[in-house]
Amino acid sequence: MKLRDNCKYDLVCPTSMGVRITPVDRLPVHTSRFFEMQATSAESNVLNVSSSLGLKTKVLTSFVKDSPIASFIKAELRFRNIDYEGPEVPQGGAWGYRHQFNIADSGFGSRGPRVWNDRSGEVGRTLKAQDFDLDRIFRTEGVRILHLSGLVCALSPETTAFCLEVARAAKEANGTVISFDLNYRASFWKGREEELRAAFSEIAGVADILIGNEEDFQLALGMKGPEAGGKDLEKKIGQFKDMIAQVRASYPQAGVFATTLREVVSANEHNWGALVLVGDTWYVEEPRPIQVMDRIGGGDGFVGGLLYAILAGKPQEDWIKMGWATGVLATTVLTDYSTPADEEQIWSVYSGNARVKR
């Protein structure tokens, strides 16, 4: 895959930043008194792999002016080597704007994870193209890969228009590769199905990399595919290939298609695999058992590793391997994002080598 040269940024994405609070000691939310807080969003989770390994990344977002939560988020992004750009939006009083809160129970054993999204008044829903100099970002500074997510696209009519404008600006910049992770959420689509289907189809129509699970491709783009739920995955790989072949036929300009394969045994044990089509070549990581501390962010970790491998110029057969491993790495920690210490750690995870490194 050919990427632009001499760009200020390797990877940029629009996002709505928020925080996640998680009970300590893996307790359920309703019985906990102590929580850990982290800055998070699906899109910044993706960037974290590349930012951890020395590439230049940036989020396009918005902040609540003078908010201590906004200050916390900015500090976390700086710590993670992720640049940020976006407007400071006045709160508008106690009942005005704020950053989203995700309240997450990681689960344990037979007690599955539970996530409560508290997004009322979310400042990220106000994102609009007028708040950014897209010509400067994509032409003057330059971006090698723009990563778009269906979560941000579906947040509000304003963010839908924003993502469409960003995709068009990137496409017109001659050389910026566009990655689109469908990230379908039924609650975001309710009452806006026709509008969002058209928007997602337009973005998919200019994307070079299309990513989604079986539910995403079926419900966001109208493809036929295997039943969602992750049972008997080894027997369904042919169905996944057929689904992606449909997507490729509908969006032939894209050169890379990817999906993860996940079967949940318990909160702490999954069978984890992936499927990637590059041109006419299939790459398959058949599901194998992994131990899970916290599943949230595993899919984002996969996308992050896949995009890092492309940006780093790795052989295309390694793209799926690095994505698989950084997805696994995200599930070994309580943060939503994968933070590889170096490439060696990624390959150790891939090979199943958990020996002490001294």
Image (cartoon, grey):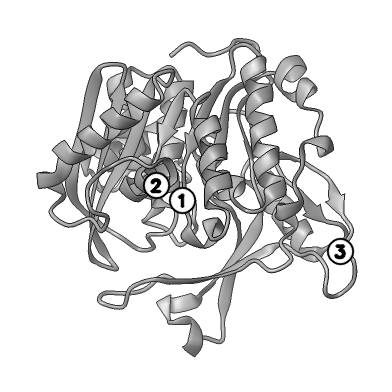
Secondary structure type for disc 2: helix
Residue sitting farthest toward the front: 194
Secondary structure type for disc 3: loop
Horizontal side of residue 39 vs 42, given as left or right: right
Q: Which mark is residue 143?
A: none
Q: Are marks 2 and 1 in contact (CB under 8 Å)?
A: yes
Q: Residues within 10 Å of mark 1 (few under 14, many from 20)?
A: many
Tell me if residue 115 can be seen: yes
Q: Inspect the image, locate mark 1, and give the three-letter code of the amino acid beneath it.
A: Tyr
Q: Which mark is residue 184?
A: 1
Horizontal side of residue 71 vs 277, given as left or right: right
Q: Which mark is residue 91?
A: 3
Which quadrant does the C terminus fall into?
Answer: top left
Q: Inspect the image, locate mark 2, and give the three-letter code of the amino acid beneath it.
A: Asp
Q: Which residue is mark 2?
A: 216
**Image point 31% across, 46% down: which residue?**
214
Q: Earlier in the sequence, mark 1 or mark 3?
A: 3
Label 2 – label 3 distance at C-alpha: 34 Å
Tell me if residue 342 can be seen: no
**Image point 49% across, 31% down: which residue?**
204
x and y, in percent, of residue 33 in the image: 56, 87
Which circle, 1 or 3, is nearer the viewer?
Answer: 1
**Image point 71% across, 61% down: which residue?**
122
Secondary structure type for disc 1: loop
Q: Earlier in the sequence, mark 2 or mark 1?
A: 1
Horizontal side of residue 175 vs 232, given as left or right: right
x and y, in percent, of residue 284 in the image: 20, 33
Q: Inspect the image, locate mark 3, and give the three-letter code of the amino acid beneath it.
A: Gln
Q: Residues within 10 Å of mark 2 (few under 14, many from 20)?
A: many
